Amino acid sequence: MKKQTQNTSPDSFLNLDPFIDIVTNVIGAFFFVIIYIALASSGIKSKITTPLFSVVDTNPIYFECRNQTAFFPDIEGLRKESNEVWKKIQVGNWFRKVEILKTFNISNQFYTYVPEKERDKRGSWTVKDNFEPIPDARGETSFQIKREDSLFRRKLATLDPNQQHLYFIVRNDSFEIFHVARAITLESGFRVGWNPLESNKTLGFTSSGGGVDPSNIQ
């Protein structure tokens, strides 16, 4: 007697392909999560080639890179001079006092001080310290700042890396010399912060220290 033959046509089997695909995706996602958690917990990080920043409590000393030269613009010296002049102006009207301060032409070889009236976050009037760059001002070239007797290195020698860090204002034509100056600064034990700025843009500081953020450094 003939045996009953089995129907072996594809239609008689359960199609498991969709189920297998789902299981495969779930397992893959599960392993990805495990790998991510393992890397995060072990502290492994991707390499970042852009400057890293952290917050420190040292005081900023401003330097600038402009016209492919580096120099110490002595911003704090100009602010100190403006404060001394402000105290000497014997005028009761605050707005008039600001206008008189503008006439004193406070400047050095790199910047001209220009005070401006503005409101702070509370709505009170305050003086914003603006510094307009003198276009043709130049400091030392990348070759000159490498010398042991350069003005740049001599200024560094007067500073304390435990108390101060360098903050560079980097004009858009001077990134090359900035890299040289930053390398020298780091080799001297200082932390470094920097802020890119257009060539002719004015520096601005409010009475609370705004304008650039000197607390974020490398």
Image: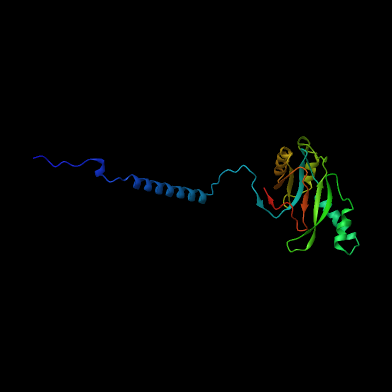
Asked whether 123 or 181 is in front, the reply is 123
Residue 200 image offset from top left, x and y in percent: 78, 44
Q: Which quadrant would residue 144 be assigned to in this image?
A: top right
Question: Does 210 appear above or below 153?
Answer: below
Question: Does 127 appear above or below 144?
Answer: below
In this picture, residue 131 sits left or right of residue 103: left
The answer to whether residue 84 of the structure is visible from this angle is no
Picture residue at 85% right of the left edge, 62% below the top:
94
**Which color scheme does this rendered protein use?**
rainbow
In this picture, residue 142 sits left or right of residue 107: left
Position of the N terminus by quadrant: top left
Question: Does 182 appear above or below 119?
Answer: above
Residue 140 image offset from top left, x and y in percent: 80, 38
Picture residue at 65% right of the left edge, 49% below the top:
53
The answer to whether residue 81 of the structure is visible from this angle is yes
Picture residue at 81% right of the left edge, 47% below the top:
132
